[in-house]
Image: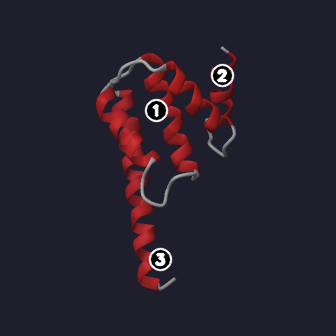
Amino acid sequence: MSSKKKLKELSREQEFKKLFKGAIEAYKSHEFKTSYNSFQSVTFGHKIENTKLAFDAKYFLAIHLMYGFGVSKNPNKALRLFKEVSKSNSKHKNEAKKCLKN
């Protein structure tokens, strides 16, 4: 991989980290539509799927879907996301496991 390409990849990764941080801030401020859309962008971002950051974002997507924060409730989809997160390297892995037990 060329150094230009590596630099571009690092720049994209930083963009997704900023987007995730903004999503957390929106979530804490109860701006749920904004946070949901941002978490979704991080989860399915170009070349970021299946990374720790993407799984961290999936955890919050699942919370939104489970409780209807900014979107229609969808417990089945939420449980699928919790299951994925529970098997990942996300820092929310244990919380996701707890959600699956309830």
Question: Which residue is more in the foreground, 52 or 84?
Answer: 84
Labels 2 and 1: the sequence-earlier one? 1
Q: Which residue is mark 3?
A: 6
Question: Which residue is more in the foreground, 65 or 6?
Answer: 65
Q: Is residue 63 left or right of residue 35?
A: right
Which residue type does callout 3 highlight? Answer: Lys
Q: Position of residue 102 (x, y in %)?
A: 65, 14
User: Element under label 1?
Assistant: helix
Q: At 52% from the left edge and 52% from the top edge, which residue is drawn?
A: 49
Q: Is residue 88 left or right of residue 64?
A: right
Q: Residues within 10 Å of mark 3 (few under 14, many from 20)?
A: few
Mark 2 and mark 1: Cα distance apart in space: 15 Å
User: Element under label 3?
Assistant: helix
Q: At 63% from the left edge and 21% from the top edge, which residue is drawn?
A: 99
Q: Position of residue 82 (x, y in %)?
A: 60, 30
**Furthest-bottom residue in view?**
2
Q: Which residue is mark 1?
A: 61
Which residue type does callout 1 highlight? Answer: Leu
Which residue type does callout 2 highlight? Answer: Leu
Q: Quadrant of residue 97?
A: top right
User: How many numbered discs?
Assistant: 3
Res. 12 mark: none
Mark 3 and mark 2: Cα distance apart in space: 38 Å
Residue 14 versus residue 91 in the image, above or below: below
Q: Which residue is mark 2?
A: 100
Mark 3 and mark 1: Cα distance apart in space: 29 Å
